[in-house]
Image (cartoon, rainbow, N blue to C red):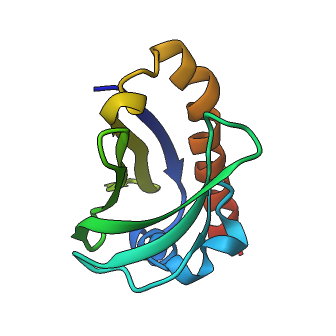
């Protein structure tokens, strides 16, 4: 199964990082990949979301995703799918570091389309968008 994985160290309290990640209603203000979301983060919540399609520059995808992992201060994930064609599990995992938080941010891809992405395509077309989210999160935390 193809996957995307990025990491960043954030010099901010764990609670503050978590607060920004679960505040879906404000994603449009800072998140350059998940450009619109609405709803309360909780296990099983269905969240209408609009995100950029890294595989097709300039296009967006609107989908209602389901929060599949909600462990306050530790992990947040949501899943979305187009039956048979694509499924993805987008996640954030947090761990405390001496100076703040280590954030792992990625996505596990599946389905006919998802399984067709090569490591080269993922590195070229997807990873930069996920790293941009990480940097935007760091900027948001500095406010």
Q: Could you tell me which quadrant the N terminus lies in?
A: top left
Q: Is residue 139 left or right of residue 107?
A: right
| Number of marks drawn | 0
For residue 31, side relative to residue 25 (left or right) = right
Residue positioned 56% across, 19% down in the render: 121
Does residue 142 appear in this view? no
Q: Position of residue 102 (x, y in %)?
A: 41, 49
Image coordinates of residue 4 in percent, x first then y, are 43, 33
- The answer to whether residue 87 is visible is yes
Q: Residue at x 47, y 40 (%)?
A: 7
**Depth order, front residue of 27/18:** 27
Relative height, residue 53 to residue 76 (above, below): above
Task: Name the image quarter holding the C terminus.
Answer: bottom right
Q: Nearer the viewer, residue 42 or 118?
A: 118
Residue 55's place in the image compared with 30, above or below, is above
In the image, residue 113 above or below residue 93:
above
45 horizontally vs 12: left or right: left
Please report the residue visible at 67 percent of the width from the left and 72 percent of the height from the top: 28
Give the image location of residue 10, x and y in percent.
53, 55
């Amino acid at each position: 199964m193809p996957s995307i994985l990025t990491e960043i160290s954030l010099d901010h309290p764990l609670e503050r990082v978590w607060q920004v990640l679960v505040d879906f209603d404000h994603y449009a203000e800072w998140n350059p990949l998940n450009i619109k979301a609405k709803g309360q983060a909780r296990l099983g919540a269905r969240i209408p979301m609009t995100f950029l399609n890294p595989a097709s520059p300039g296009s967006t995808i609107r989908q209602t995703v389901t929060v599949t992992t909600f462990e306050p201060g530790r992990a947040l994930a949501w899943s979305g799918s187009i039956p048979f064609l694509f499924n993805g599990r987008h996640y954030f995992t947090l761990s405390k570091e001496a100076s703040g938080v280590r954030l792992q941010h990625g996505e596990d891809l599946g389905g006919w389309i998802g399984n067709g992405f090569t490591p080269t395509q993922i590195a070229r077309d997807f990873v930069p968008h996920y790293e941009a989210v990480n940097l935007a999160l760091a900027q948001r935390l500095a406010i």
